[in-house]
Image: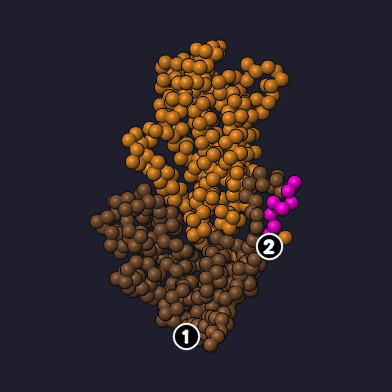
Chain colours: A orange, B brown
Amino acid sequence: MIEFAERMATADTADRLKTAPLRGVFAYRTLLKYLVLKEIKVKSRGTYLGVAWTLMNPLFTIVVYFVLFHYIFRIQIPDFLAFFLLGFLMWVFFSRAITGAATCIVENDSMIKRSMIPLEILPITVVLYHLFHHVIAVSIALPFMFALWGAKMSWHVLWAVVVLTAFAGFTLAVSLWLATTGVFFRDTRDILEVAMPVLFWATPIFYSTDMAPPVLRPVLQANPLSSFIGVMRAAVVEGRAPGAVQVGVMTTWLVLTLTSGIWVFMRYQPRFAEEA
Amino acid sequence: MAPAVECRAVSKAFVLRTNRQYLFKERVLGMVRPHLRETRQLFWALQQISFEVHPGEMIGIIGPNGAGKTTLLRIIAGIFRATTGSVHVRGRIAPLLGLGVGFHPELTGRENIYLGASVFGFTTREIRGLERSIIAFAELDRFIDVAAKNYSSGMQVRLGFSIALEVKPDIFLIDEVLSAGDEHFQRKCLARLEAERQAGRTFLVATHNLQFAEEWCDRVGLLMGARLDALGPPRDVVRHYRERVSSDEAAATPTVLP
C-alpha cells in the first residue's frame, strides 16, 4: 500500500484535502447558487413550458395511479388522494435526486480536474435542484389537499417544514453515498434503475404499513422512507402531531445516514479527481 | 523571504489498470474468470521533484507531452495528492488549468461570467463589481447576452481568460492557456500579465512555447521522464532541452543506405 504524505498547504483557498466539509461549502456558496440556477435554466430554456415540464411528468403518473388504486383496487383509506399524493411527491424527489447524484462526480470531471472547488458542492447541487421542484409541487398540491381532498388543516402542518428539512438531509446522505460509489463503480446507476422500482413498492406510498400482513410489517417499517413519509402524513393529512417514537426513529435515521454519508464522501473525495 | 511554493521530493504514482473493472458486474465475473481480472501496474508520473518558487517569481515548466507538467500543477493546487513528498503553499492559489471552467453553452456570456467567476470562490456582489471590466477586456459587449454556444472558440477563450485575470491571487498556476485568442488579444494578455507580475504575483507556467519561456520567465524547469531534469536560467535550460530533443531524434532516425 502506498503511503500518502500529509500535505501542509497554508492556502486560504479551499484546499480539497484539508477543508472541513461545511467550511468549504460556505466559502463556495455562490458557486452552489449558480450551479443550481444553471440546472434550472438549462433544463427549461428553449422549452415551451419551462419548469412546468418537470412537474407535468409526475402529474400524469398521479392521475393514472389515482384512478387505478381508488376506482379499481378500491383501497379503503380515508382521504386517499391526499394520502398517496404526499408520499408520491416525496418519492419523486428522493428517487430523482439520488439517481442524479450517482453520476454527478463523473459527469463533472472536467471541472473537478481543473479547479479547486470543494466536491461536496456537486451532490448538494443535485439535491437542491430537485428540492426546488419538490417545493413547487408540494405548494401547488397543498391548497387542493386542504380545500378539496379532505386533509385536516391545523397548526401541526408546520411540522411539514421540519420533516421536509430532515428528508432533504436524508436524501443528501444517500446522495453522498451514491456519489462516492458512482466514482468507483460505474454501474451504480444501472443497479439503481433495477433497485428503485423494488424500493418504490416496498415503500408505503399507496398503502399504509397497517394494511400489510404482520409478517411483512417489520420489513416495511425498517424502510427509512416509511418513517419520513409517516411523519409527513400525520402532520399534513391527519392534522395531528406526529408521535414521539415516529419522530425519534426519523431523527435517528437522519443522524446515522448523514454522518456516515459525510464521512464516506470526505474519506474518498481526494481520489475523485484521479478516478473520475 | 519564505518561498511561495515549496515542493520537497514530490512523487506521484498512478495505478495503470488493464481490464479496468469499472463495474460491480466485472468484479464478480473476475472471481470466476481469471483472464478478466484487473491487473495493476504502478506508473510514476513524477519522481523526486524538489524546488522552490520565490514570491514574485515567474517559473516556466517545459518538457515533452506526458512529462508530468499538468500533474505537477494539479498536485500544487491540491487537486491530486502527492504519493510521497510534501508541498507547502503560502498564499492564495488560482489554478488556470483550462479556460472557462464551469461554462455551459446554453447559458449567455453574462450568466457564464457569474458561474465561471464563482468557481474561483467569488461572491455575487464581487462579481457584479468585476462584470464590466471582464466584458470590456474580452471585447464582448455586443454579444454578452447571447448564448455561449453561438460564440466562436476564440470568443469563449477570451471570456474565460478575462475572468481568470480578475482573480488576483498570490500565486497563478497556468497550464498552456496563454496562447488564447488572436494576435491582438494575445498581446493584450501579455501586457496584462506583465502588470500582474509588476504587482508582485508569483507564476508557475507550464508551456510548450519555448520562446515565451526564454523571454518571460525568471527561471525554467525542464520535466523529462518524470524527473526535474534541469532548473535554472531560461536560455540554458531551453538550449539543453533542444539539444536533448534533437539528439533523441537523431538516435531514432534510421541511417539512410546509399
Q: Residue at x 57, y 41 (%)?
A: A189
Q: Nearer the viewer, mark 1 or mark 2?
A: 2
Residue A177 or residue B70, whichever sits in front = B70
Q: Amino acid at mark 2?
A: Gln
Which residue does the image show at 44% across and 47% down from the upper left?
A: A35
The magenta-colored residue range is: B31-40
Q: Tell me the kind of residue under disc 1.
A: Arg
Chain letter for the residue marked with disc 1 in the picture = B
Q: Position of residue A27 (x, y in %)?
A: 48, 53
Image location (x, y in percent) of residue B179: 39, 70
Say what secondary structure mark 1 lies in: helix
Above or below, comparing residue B141 to residue B255 in the picture: above
Using the image, tell me which numbered label, if any, was put on residue A111: none
The residue singled out by tag 2 in the image is: B41
Chain designation of label 2: B
Residue B39 included in the magenta stretch of the image: yes
Q: Would residue B105 be seen by someone viewing this image from the given angle?
A: yes
Q: Position of residue A115 (x, y in %)?
A: 49, 59
Residue B251 sits above or below residue B101 on the image: below
Q: Residue at x 52, y 83 (%)?
A: B246
- Provide the residue designation for mark 1: B235
Q: Is residue B224 left or right of residue B97?
A: right
Whether tag 1 and tag 2 are in contact, CB under 8 A, the answer is: no
User: How many numbered discs?
Assistant: 2
Q: Secondary structure at mark 2?
A: strand
- Left or right? Give the position of A25 relative to B153: right
Residue at screen point 66% across, 47% down: B26
